[in-house]
Amino acid sequence: MKLADKKLWLELYDVADTIQKIEPWKYLWDMDLLAYVCQPMDEIFYCSVMGHGGMHKAIAVYQGEQIHSLFELAKEQYPDYELINYQNCITCNFLSRQQTLPQNREIIKELGLSFRGIWISFENYEKGYEPSPININQVKIMIEALKNFYMMFRAIIEKGLKVDFENGQMLVRRYDKERKLFLNYPAPLILPEKHFYTIRIESEFEKNIMKLPQTEMELEYEFLNYVPIRISDKKEQDGRYYYPISRLIAERKSGFIISHDLIDKNDYKNKDDYVLESVELLINYFYKIGRPKSIYVRDEETKMCLKDILDKAKIKIIVKPKLKAIDEFYYTLGKMKM
């Protein structure tokens, strides 16, 4: 580890140790958001405290649009194996040695630190990857975010700043250039706009697709999520393991699996190419079996990707976090593996 990197890591551990001593999980719930507007990075960081309910203690930091994943998880509607697709953040953890990633234990050892009872560590949660240690750029982000989280929390506990979290407020911290000081104040919950990828279809498609008969069939389609299967040779240069993408079409009523593939993301030049192929796969099935009455998808991202196509084909699109046939298929595979 470079000396400069080691200094940053030690600074981060010093901040985290300070936060551990004030025990914010005794006062805040995970949906009580503290937001820091970081002008140097041109970003907003949302901080969520875990542990009030007695589960493991941590501070999760969401950067910009990542905050939407917290609200997806809060629905508590997704099957367990799908949760990895709706957790995008970096965390400061306060766990036992056994719960700490082996790679993080190595970092702690290299830094010359030691813990008794509760160990402090940091993890990166990114869609498509196993949880992993944070990189040096994320160390810098965590230093900035946690330092300001600490100041926001002090404003609540020591200065008595009132924030009506239960009625949709959050605590905001930003630097006022004119007054040359940081301001902490309650504000209505404001989330960054969520951007979706949408495929647009030419008008000629609508004419052709409407010539197909419409059936009573109901399909489920998933092609943007990953399944948590570690494959030994699927590893990035930085050592992170990545998961295969699940592309699966099922008939909802019968549970029949029409098509199933586990996709390696490196088989495609980029995500656009993969999505286009996945859409073409679905359209080809329309020409084989007719237009289904409806298609069920797991989330808004998948819905928006297919919306223009299905609207033109006069096919109803329904969002259900739990997909009956697809989830049963993976549940059965899991039992067989056990």
Image (cartoon, rainbow, N blue to C red):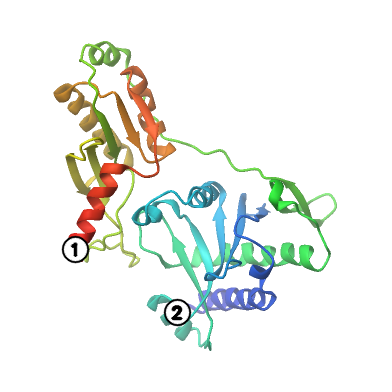
Task: Answer with the quarter of the image where residue 291 lies.
Answer: top left
Q: Which residue is most to the front?
A: 253
From this view, report whether residue 305 is shown above or below residue 235. above
Circle 1 crowding by C-alpha within 10 Å: few under 14, some 14–19, many from 20: few
Horizontal and vertical percent for residue 15? 64, 74
Task: Answer with the quarter of the image where residue 144 lies.
Answer: bottom right
Residue shown at 27%/10% (left/top)?
A: 207
The amino acid sitting under disc 2 is Ile
Rendered-image quadrant of the N terminus:
bottom left
Report the front residue among 213 and 131. Answer: 213
Identify residue for label 1: 337
The amino acid sitting under disc 1 is Lys
Q: In the rendered picture of this protein, how many numbered marks are placed on residues?
A: 2
From this view, report whether residue 7 is shown above or below residue 134. below
Report the front residue among 228 and 218. Answer: 218
Circle 2 crowding by C-alpha within 10 Å: few under 14, some 14–19, many from 20: some
Question: Residue 121: which numbered mark, if any?
Answer: none
Question: Residue 107: which numbered mark, if any?
Answer: 2
